[in-house]
Amino acid sequence: MRSVNTEKRPKQGPIAERLAILLDIFSPWEHISLTYRQFAAELGPPVTEAAVKKWPQRKKFPADVARLIIARARERGLTGVTLEWVLWGEGVRPQKALMTAPNSPVVPRAAPAERAEEPQGRFAVRIAKALEADLSHNEFGQWSSVEVQHTVIWALKDLARRLWVLRFDMGKTFELTDDWAGKIGLPVRPPDSAGDERRPADE
């Protein structure tokens, strides 16, 4: 027989487990997690205790809050707290920072050498060339298939939305997919609501 309290308890959403991990790793104490009020204070305005209490029932963290969590985690030297993990649970589980001696100064971490030395845009150019090489393949007339065209459009749109959350300007990709969708008869949003497509559903 189920208890009344169990039936009335709000349903836990996909981010409940991630929030519990964040409450633990942001805590300065071993085996004692932060409360919702303490976590809200840790993140600072505009995050409130009331907002944090609602997160376990949500499907996603709000994107602006996710970015704030990343910024605070970097300030505290927490590893593994990435946008991919916070928003989608992808990647390695975050870890607590190494315990330091009391009153010891916190030394900011330097960016990894490979990231700091990589010229801006080089990775994007390599991706573009790889996509061009792969998608130009048409030995069996794949591009004449409406199913293939639909699949590619939706895949590009999904990729663009994810990268938009990560603060890449995906305007050209959205323009390309909208133009292509219009040509093959898929519904296209009017220009005045095009910005809504880029806006993450959790904002």
Image (spheres, rainbow, N blue to C red):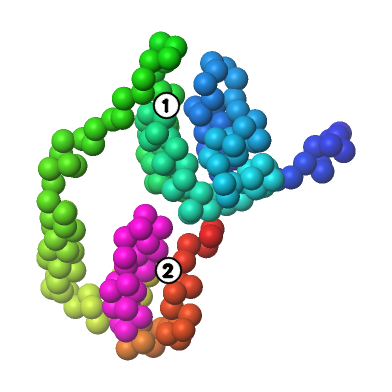
Q: Nearer the viewer, residue 43 or 186?
A: 43
Circle number at residue 86: none
Please indicate, yes or no, whether residue 187 appears anywhere in the rendered image.
no
What distance separates the C-alpha of mark 2 from that of mark 1? 32 Å
Relative side of 50 to 140, left or right: right
Is 159 covered by the magenta stretch? yes
Q: Secondary structure at mark 2?
A: helix
N-term-proximal mark, 2 vs 1: 1
- The answer to which image quadrant residue 147 occupies is bottom left
Q: Nearer the viewer, residue 28 or 174?
A: 28
**Which residue appears at 43% of the width and 78% of the height?**
194
The x, y position of residue 48, in whole percent, is 64, 45
Is 193 covered by the magenta stretch? no
- The answer to which image quadrant residue 37 occupies is top right
Residue beneath label 2, please? 198
The x, y position of residue 172, in whole percent, is 28, 74
Which contiguous range is marked in magenta? 156-180
**Which residue appears at 17% of the width and 42% of the height?**
116
For badge 1, the amino acid type reads Gln
**Which residue appears at 14% of the width and 72% of the height?**
136
Circle number at residue 95: 1
Relative side of 155 to 41, left or right: left
Q: Residue furthest top?
A: 101
Q: Is residue 86 above or below residue 163?
A: above
Q: Is residue 130 above or below residue 1?
A: below
